[in-house]
Amino acid sequence: MTTISASEEQRILDQVPKQLYIGGEWRDGAKGELAVEDPATGETLCEVADGSTDDAKAALDAAVAAGPEFATMAPRDRGEILRKAFELVSARADELALLMTLEMGKPLAESKAEITYGAEFLRWFSEQAVRIDGRYAVAPNGQGRLLTMKQPVGPCLLITPWNFPLAMGTRKVGPAIAAGCTMVVKPAQQTPLSMLMLAKILEEAGLPGGVVNLITASSSSETMGPLIADPRLRKLSFTGSTEIGRKLMEQASENLLRLSMELGGNAPFIVFDDADVDDAVQGALIAKMRNVGEACTAANRFHVSSKVADQFAEKLAEKIGAMKVGRGTEENVEVGPLIDDKQRTKVAELVEDAVGRGAHALVGGHTRDGAGYFYDPTVLADVPDGADLLTEEIFGPVAPVKGFEDEDEAVAAANDTEFGLVAYVYTSDLKRALRVVEQLQTGMVGLNQGMVSNAAAPFGGIKQSGFGREGGPEGIEEYLETKYVAVNL
Ligand code: NAP
């Protein structure tokens, strides 16, 4: 890979439609424009439409109007549109990856991996569209017949975060289209460009106007609040912080909306002394450093058997310390900037707190001077109980390592959190692996691997990490209602 030129960057930015997409039309936002920043420089990349409450209402009007006809479109035709969109995204993977790096900051290779991952939801759900079925059963008394059918839930509101600008959208848009739902999509204001490109691609793929409506806005509460209160909306799918998720759930209770909540995480990464330490370090690098540590699935704390904790921490520090930090468009860069100054300050404060309590940095531990929101990749050893980063989501390139004495202590430490998204376990003992996996209070577990994300698998959490599943056969169920018909024979 060679460093990308400024003119190439501009060419990619110029391709992005910057308006709102409502009822199949691109139009200006009533509140003017909203700046999108490059987190590696702090400079404005471009401006996109700033939608108002009326714009959001128009988007829901369009989704409601398009609903009945789209719900009856042949499943095969819905699937073919998704398949075409998958092909278009895949064909433009390099350009979409550059766009993602510009708005979100992660290195190009990682953006490319997200494009592949995000596109896979379009392909997976193109295949699921034709597998929506029902049941026919004889009533237990033999008299009547029990018929069940699946129908689209109706107009949906899909709200996505900035950390995976495309995949968090396709995880929702894919199954919603496959199920026959229409929708309003609101990407995070920091990273709207990837989703704007997806809307353009879906249009090119033949999606009828009004099925996907996209609102970009500087005030999410002002624009989204009235939609959540609108009785025509039937479902809210949200990916973001637990704090905002709770608020939205409260608002959604008024209309008893169907909900999917993909919220924050605090993933434990457990390494037993029977594990292959080099494999565990390799898995740790992925679980920690993917997405510059800004992933809900990021390993937040490393619980390592005291017999191998020093060895593990030193090897991890060596690898992490060797990673090249810089703008994601530059050659060989492996760690980009954090999304903004607020996020970087939070990471710095968590590290200061841990060090103040007795942890010591084997590598890193500092904010980088200069433009952009860079933070040094960091490994902290001997992290004591009570350090804030053991209980809070770090969302940055910081790996705290803490020792444990036995299996019970490891499991108790792993479960000692309000979150329950994912956990990682490294062990070569099969019995121990299954014993521990069964006790972990999470929706997902990576067993001897540092990544769980897969379009064909049900992604989601328990406890304060939310509920609902995205991907896999389960993913489409979030957008379907079951209707039961009592048949008199
Ligand atoms: P966030 O602040 O909760 O925002 C997420 C989305 O919600 C953004 O589009 C945001 O819009 C919007 N939003 C904020 N306040 C709102 C309101 N009052 N009404 C309606 N919409 C509102 O989260 P984030 O900082 O973007 O993302 C990071 C969080 O997402 C982390 O906690 C991470 O763990 C979680 N996450 C979870 C998963 C998962 O699958 N479990 C996946 C990825 C990320 P604005 O941009 O305008 O603020």
Image: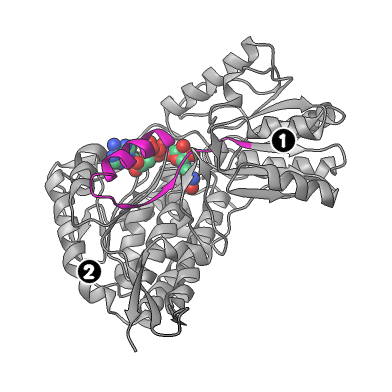
When the figure is inspected, residue 21 is found, relative to residue 432, above or below; the finding is below
Task: Indicate the quadrant where residue 364 lies.
Answer: top right
Amino acid type assigned to the residue bearing label 2 in the image: Gly
As for residue 253 lying within the magenta part, the answer is yes
Position of 335 relative to 237 (above/below) = above
User: Distance between the Cα atoms at labels 2 and 1?
Assistant: 47 Å
In this picture, which residue range is highlighted in magenta? Answer: 241-267
Please check the rendered image and state whether residue 195 is part of the magenta-colored stretch, yes or no: no
Q: Position of residue 305 (x, y in %)?
A: 81, 31
The residue located at (34%, 78%) in the rendering is: 486
Mark 1 lies on residue: 411
Q: Could you say where residue 106 lies in the image, as x and y percent from the top left?
A: 52, 43
Residue drawn at x 57%, y 61% is: 457
Q: Amino acid at mark 1?
A: Val
Q: Residue furthest front?
A: 141
Residue beneath the point at 56% across and 64% down: 456
Residue 386 or 397: which is nearer the viewer? 386
Residue under label 2, please give it.
67
Dot 1, how many residues are within 10 Å of its Cα: few (below 14), some (14-19), or many (20+)?
Answer: some
